[in-house]
Image (cartoon, rainbow, N blue to C red):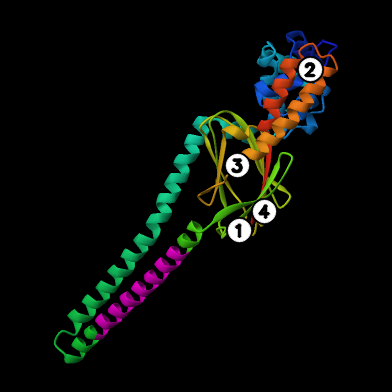
Amino acid sequence: MSENTKSIGETLRDARIAKGYTLDDLQQTTKIQKRYLIAIEDGNFSDLPGDFYVRAFIKQYAETVGLDGNDLLEEYSDQLPSTKTQEYVDRVNEDNPSTRSAQRKVDDRTARIRRQVPIVAAVVVVVAVLIGIWYASTRNSQSSSSSQNVDSSSVSVSGSSAKSSSQASSSSKKATKASTKASKASFSKVSTSGSTTTYTMTNAPKTKTLKIRTSSSAWVAVTSAGSSVYQGTLPASQVKTVKLSSSATSVNINLGNAPVTKISIGGKQLPISTATSSATTASSTTTGSSSTTTGTANGTSASSTSSTTTSQVQNIVVQFK
């Protein structure tokens, strides 16, 4: 237990001030939202996305202002959420490459078994039918009735094959129809208000799958039907797949670093609006200028930083039709 009278938030704030960083500077460097940085300094850890992010954000904050993140976490461990909660363990396993690799191997093995089950079942049925025909033919080879039975069995098998072929053709047509609908899916922008842009996706697929890729580390949160589906910081070049409910009528996507983020829904690329980014930049520049007027020592730098940071944050709403 730490004997330091300061809280961990006060220690971080003092180190930030000593470095000459503003909260906007820190947000730009760490890609952690400003409201989370303020919550860390005030000790309001319940305002952060979860127990895992309390330690992750504090460590990143500490290393940015020149402190040893691991030492700081150990020193103030009594002020931080437990690392033994299920949420923390699950999140650590998710970010651990070896754990993900092992899980993928299990999933691949299960998928192979599932693919082989129908094949094995079909082979067993065919073998059973052939054995039955052979047995009937051998037993009654000297009688004409036996020949008729064999012919009847052959017709039955042929009829079954024709039925299976018809069902396969029907399934193929359904798949083609679904593929055609997906290819006709399109986005249209409905409105832009501040950093929020609303789109409509027409001919949206029944299975709504989001694929999110970033060229640099970025924080992303996905919400649908009022519930959080995913939130976290994506490393560069990693693809995150998020599946929505088939009954979902809309999805809300918060981007902490929009310019480096690409999103597709059902295989269709979402056109992240550049107009939103420009409008926000203008607003941010005005804010930065106001900050300079108040006499901030680093006014010009703060204005530029605020403009860049704000333009990166976007809230995208997609409505499915």
Q: CA distance from mark 4 to mark 3?
A: 16 Å
Query: Can residue 179 be seen in the rendering of this structure?
Result: yes
Q: Which residue is mark 2?
A: 8
x 82%, y 10%: residue: 4
* Side of 149 relative to 215 (left or right): left
**Which sits in the foreground, 274 or 272?**
274
On whether residue 158 falls in the magenta region, the answer is: yes
Q: Which residue is mark 4?
A: 250
In the image, which residues are magenta?
152-177
On whether residue 211 falls in the magenta region, the answer is: no
Q: Residues within 10 Å of mark 4 (few under 14, many from 20)?
A: some
The numbered dot on residue 246 is 1
Query: Does residue 244 sit above or below 169 in this rendering?
Result: above
The numbered dot on residue 272 is 3
Disc nearest the viewer among 1 and 4? 4
Q: Secondary structure at mark 1?
A: loop
Q: CA distance from mark 2 to mark 1?
A: 44 Å
Query: Can residue 84 be seen in the rendering of this structure?
Result: no
Image location of residue 273, percent across then percent down: 62, 41
x 40%, y 55%: residue: 115
Image location of residue 244, percent across then percent down: 61, 52
Q: Residues within 10 Å of mark 2 (few under 14, many from 20)?
A: many
Q: Residues within 10 Å of mark 3 (few under 14, many from 20)?
A: some
Q: Quadrant of the N terminus?
A: top right
* Side of 45 relative to 266 (left or right): right
